[in-house]
């Protein structure tokens, strides 16, 4: 589990709907740290961008190899 995480869901890609840039995931494992004091939300947008209770985290460069071409060419 990532350092300082409240919880983590491991997923596998089930399907990619290329024309729409949709990636269908299936949760395969979940982990929680009952001792974590942090309670902030994290939402994955799907293009490598994540929104938290605070700043927007741009991880598009890091996520690029994992994203389907239809997501990479989509206009933001």
Image (cartoon, grey):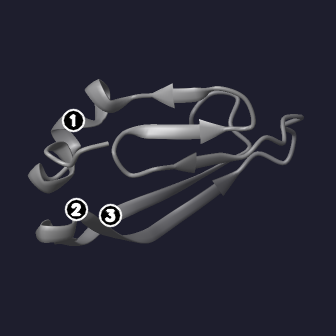
In the rendered image, residue 70, in percent from the top left (x then y), is placed at 13, 55
Q: Is residue 19 above or below residue 70?
A: below
| Distance from the alpha carbon under mark 2 to that under mark 1 | 13 Å
Task: Please tell me which residue is depicted at 32% across the width and 42% down the height of the picture.
Answer: 76
The residue that appears at 84% across and 48% down in the rendered structure is 34
Residue shown at 27% from the left, 25% from the top: 61
Residue in the picture at 63% in, 27% down? 3
Point out residue 55 in the picture as x, y percentages from the top left corner: 65, 26
Q: Is residue 69 above or below residue 29?
A: above
Q: Which residue is mark 1?
A: 64
Q: Which mark is residue 12?
A: 3
| Disc 2/disc 3 C-alpha distance (Å) | 16 Å
User: Which type of secondary structure does the marked residue at label 3 adopt?
Assistant: strand
* Quarter of image, res 40: top right
Q: CA distance from mark 3 to mark 1?
A: 16 Å
Q: Secondary structure at mark 2?
A: loop
Question: Which of labels 2 and 3 is toward the front?
Answer: 2
Label 3 Cα neighbours within 10 Å, binned few <14 / some 14-19 / many ≥20:
few
User: Which badge, 3 or 1, is on the more N-terminal residue?
Assistant: 3
Q: Which residue was labeled with disc 2?
A: 21
């Amino acid at each position: 589990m990532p350092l300082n995480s409240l919880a983590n869901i491991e997923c596998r890609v089930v399907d990619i709907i290329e024309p729409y840039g949709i990636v269908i995931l299936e949760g395969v494992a979940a982990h929680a740290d009952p001792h974590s004091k942090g309670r902030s939300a994290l939402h994955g947008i799907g293009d490598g961008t994540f929104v938290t209770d605070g700043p927007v985290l741009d991880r598009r460069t890091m996520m690029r190899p994992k994203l389907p071409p239809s997501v990479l060419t989509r206009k933001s």
